[in-house]
Image: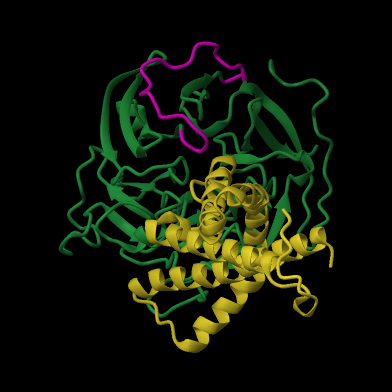
Amino acid sequence: MKNLRSGLLLATVLLSSSLQAMDYKVSTYTEGLDHPWSMAFLPDGRMLVTERVGRLRIIEADGTLREAPVSGVPEAFVSSQAGLMEVALDPDFASNQQIYLSYAYGDRGANNTRLARARLVDGALQDLTVIFSALPAKAGTSHYGGRIAFLPDKTLLLTLGDGFDYREEAQNAANHLGKIVRINRDGSVPVNNPVINQPDAAPEIYSLGHRNVQGIVYDSQLNRLYSTEHGPKGGDELNMLEPGKNYGWPLATFGVDYNGAQISPYTELPGYEPPLLHWTPSVAPSSLTVYNGSKFEQWRGDLFVSTLAERSVRRIRMKGSMLAGEEVLFEELDERIRDVRGGPDGALYLLTDSSDGRVLKVLPAE
Amino acid sequence: MSGLSRTLWSFVIAVVLVALIGAVLQTQYNLAMLEALGAPVPLDIRLQTTGLDLLGFAPVFAILVTFGFALALPLATLVSKFLPALHWLVFALAGALAIFTALCAVNAALPMPTFIGANRSLDGTLGLMLCGALGGLLYDKLRCAPVHASQGITHEKSA
């Protein structure tokens, strides 16, 4: 493979976990990316990768990074956590070539998360349309959410953040701060959204009471929707999402503020959904996927959570429909991991979060 | 007690006071926000949360107060020499501005927009500045208090 960094084949790692150990090898698939944020696999073997600095890149099927970024990408507000975030293919991409991009809009004083769709044609975006803008615009450059998932009915879920300074707004159904929203692929609001008949509620809301949701995945085997969100100091969460439910931030949390102050005296409250799992100290969960590939038989059906602070990927074992323990993977890389996905070839792919970011490919050891 | 020791002790006591009452204020501010969202906050929960903030938040706030006061109080000492009748006002203002400056500095230095929850609103910020003003006044009072009244020494001022 062209861009395979010679000598970087990280040796087989023998996992010391008490769970089922598995040997794997990690290799560099592509390098030279500036804070890559999200990846999507094209049907022809190529890959799309966003860079937070505002570029959408194409990686050829052999791992080569195409030099010219995709043209026609909407201009993002780039600062700190703000920038170009998720790229996702339409469920009917093979026939319509539509892709979706989430990114920060606005400026330092007034910004939030936006979603656009466009057709990918010959390395360029055409017919770009903004289909959703989170409101209100807020100040600061923190907590945008930005991850995308599709439900079986092909409606789209977009995760959002509370903007850090506006945490109480996560409980205010009149806006999009601290929410997960559900929209049709053209940006219209599904008529069966959970709060659509609630007076003064933002009709796009799917769930509320979130802090900064950067992981979401629909598990088609179990017909479940999971999300992960960053807590403050401690209190990162894995949640099982249900429409209209309130996940409690900031009324109930296992975390405290970065300055040591209490956010809430409560870790749970009646009427608010508790997390399936919480991590204290924080691991900083940056993405979430279900592995359904063919290369790692023992991993099939398990959840994988990439982390920034822990510099790892958490494998959450599933036994049937039950969570059955965790395993910390790839700590030996000592890299902030921004995204984890199962590729169509069965390999597990990772994005490292740095100015010299890489796509890593994980395969079973020989 | 030497002038330097007295100044240092006055400084430390003032910092501790501001950190403690600032932590109590931060707790009440935060609990008021949660109550507004519908959370129950009975007295035992209020006391427990306040205690946790005194342990967890006050030491962090004390660091900010130390930096702010280390700049502001020597300046106030200097200025008060020209305004002896208004020295209390000078120290109160210095204490308040020390907190404001420290909050601005930490917000600029750290990635999150606002480091301390109470600093997100005007009334919370003014409350924290009021704590600083009280600290400035206490510092002024302590450093000026009679040291050996029986020996006729009434004031020992040192910066």
Which residues are the magenta region?
A: A61-82
Q: Could you tell me which residue is drawn at 35 percent across and 58 percent down?
A: A169
Position of residue A301 relative to residue B40, above or below, is: above
Q: Is residue A203 left or right of residue A159?
A: left
- Residue A220 colored magenta? no
Residue A47 drawn at (x, y percent): 52, 26
- Decide which of A111, A275 is in the foreground and name it: A111
Q: Could you tell me which residue is drawn at 84 percent across and 63 percent down?
A: B2
Q: Colour of chain A?
A: green
Q: Is residue A7 left or right of residue B92?
A: right
Residue A363 drawn at (x, y percent): 71, 37
Q: Could you tell me which residue is drawn at 83 percent across and 55 percent down?
A: A16
Q: How is the image coloured?
A: by chain
- Decide which of A247, B101 is in the foreground and name it: B101
Q: Colour of chain B?
A: yellow
Residue A270 drawn at (x, y percent): 41, 80
